[in-house]
Image (tube, helix red, strand yellow):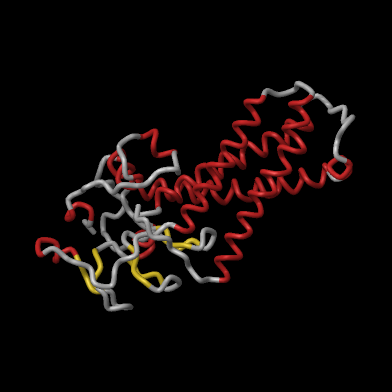
């Protein structure tokens, strides 16, 4: 992954990103305060449950922030094209710049992005070659955090023992039901939306096609896998070590793949 910070000036994207951060803050603050800490103090749950929740929350916000500011694969103004690879480049009909095949021009960002999948307003950034792995991590950890939150909401009323509330917060005690209902509604909405998106993203990697390529039908045999799934995933995440696919606190190093093979469409 490149070191450049990519900041998109888009008020609509700022609102979407701010809404996602608000949902994350809401659950990260109120779920431990309403459920985890009180039940831990009364011996109903282990400290492991609290640590796991904060672990998922940390990885979720880390992948969100990194995906939103990471360079998705913006092409330089005057790219140096090796003579042996010129046949795999083309001219963009919108910005009149040379770009590798499978690159696309983003109208919101105003430039071409290598292997662009789509522009996501929820991260206020394009999803391209250099930050696709972070977007996948965001989808993955958002599902885990939402599922964990829903399970805790359910267990608080139907499984855990009632709290004594001797030293409880008065505001939390009076508005507990409303706070948890809001948390459950947000969890269901995010889980439902992200699950469908995550599935389409995984299918795109399995078939080595982007969302734009699927919509444009630019390849006759677009649904046929061309590479082993391990290879396509390794190219997206920049490493063959599968354990590193789940860690957002690292720098992606593009795998060296033959250029004609990486740009086969």
Please say if 153 is above or below 205.
Answer: above
Q: Is residue 14 left or right of residue 36?
A: left
- In the image shown, does 254 or 189 lie closer to the viewer? 254
Q: Splitting the image into 4 quarters, where does residue 145 fall? A: top right
Q: Is residue 141 left or right of residue 200?
A: right
Q: Splitting the image into 4 quarters, where does residue 47 fall? A: top right
Q: Position of residue 190 (x, y in %)?
A: 61, 49
Instruction: Say which residue appears at 89% left-offset and 29% top-offset.
Output: 166
* Residue projecting furthest to the front: 3
Q: Position of residue 118 (x, y in %)?
A: 42, 61
If the image is split into quadrants, where does the C terminus sit? bottom left
Instruction: Say which residue appears at 57% left-offset and 36% top-offset.
Output: 55
Instruction: Say which residue appears at 84% left-offset and 28% top-offset.
Output: 163
Q: Splitting the image into 4 quarters, where does residue 45 fall? A: top right
- In the image shown, does 167 or 175 lie closer to the viewer? 167
Please say if 253 is above or below 18.
Answer: above
* Residue projecting furthest to the top: 43
- In the image shown, does 57 or 127 lie closer to the viewer? 57
Q: Is residue 19 left or right of residue 30?
A: left
Question: What number of labels is visible?
Answer: 0
Please say if 26 is above or below 47.
Answer: below
Q: Position of residue 242 (x, y in %)?
A: 36, 34
* Residue projecting furthest to the left: 84
Q: Position of residue 17 (x, y in %)?
A: 57, 60
């Amino acid at each position: 992954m490149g070191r450049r910070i990519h900041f998109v000036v888009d008020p609509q994207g700022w609102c979407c990103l701010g809404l996602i951060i608000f949902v994350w803050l809401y659950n990260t603050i109120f779920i431990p305060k309403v459920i985890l800490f009180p039940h831990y103090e009364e011996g109903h749950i282990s400290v492991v449950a609290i640590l796991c929740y904060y672990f998922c929350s940390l990885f979720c916000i880390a992948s969100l922030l990194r995906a939103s500011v990471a360079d998705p694969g913006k092409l330089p103004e005057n790219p140096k094209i090796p003579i042996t690879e010129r046949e795999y480049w083309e001219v963009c009909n919108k910005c009149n710049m040379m770009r590798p095949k499978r690159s696309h021009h983003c109208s919101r960002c105003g430039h071409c992005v290598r292997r662009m999948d789509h522009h996501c307003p929820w991260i206020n950034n394009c999803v391209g070659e250099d930050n696709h792995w972070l977007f996948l991590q965001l989808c993955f950890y958002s599902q885990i955090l939402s599922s964990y939150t829903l399970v805790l909401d359910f267990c608080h009323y139907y499984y855990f023992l009632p709290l004594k509330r001797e030293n409880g917060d008065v505001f939390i005690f009076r508005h507990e039901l409303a706070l948890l209902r809001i948390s459950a509604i947000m969890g269901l909405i995010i889980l439902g939306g992200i699950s469908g998106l995550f599935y389409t993203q995984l299918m795109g990697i399995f078939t080595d096609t982007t969302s734009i390529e699927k919509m444009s039908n630019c390849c006759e045999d677009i649904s046929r896998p061309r590479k082993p799934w391990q290879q396509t995933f390794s190219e997206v995440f920049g490493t063959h070590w599968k354990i590193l696919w789940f860690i957002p606190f690292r720098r992606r190093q593009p795998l060296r793949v033959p250029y004609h093979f990486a740009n086969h469409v």
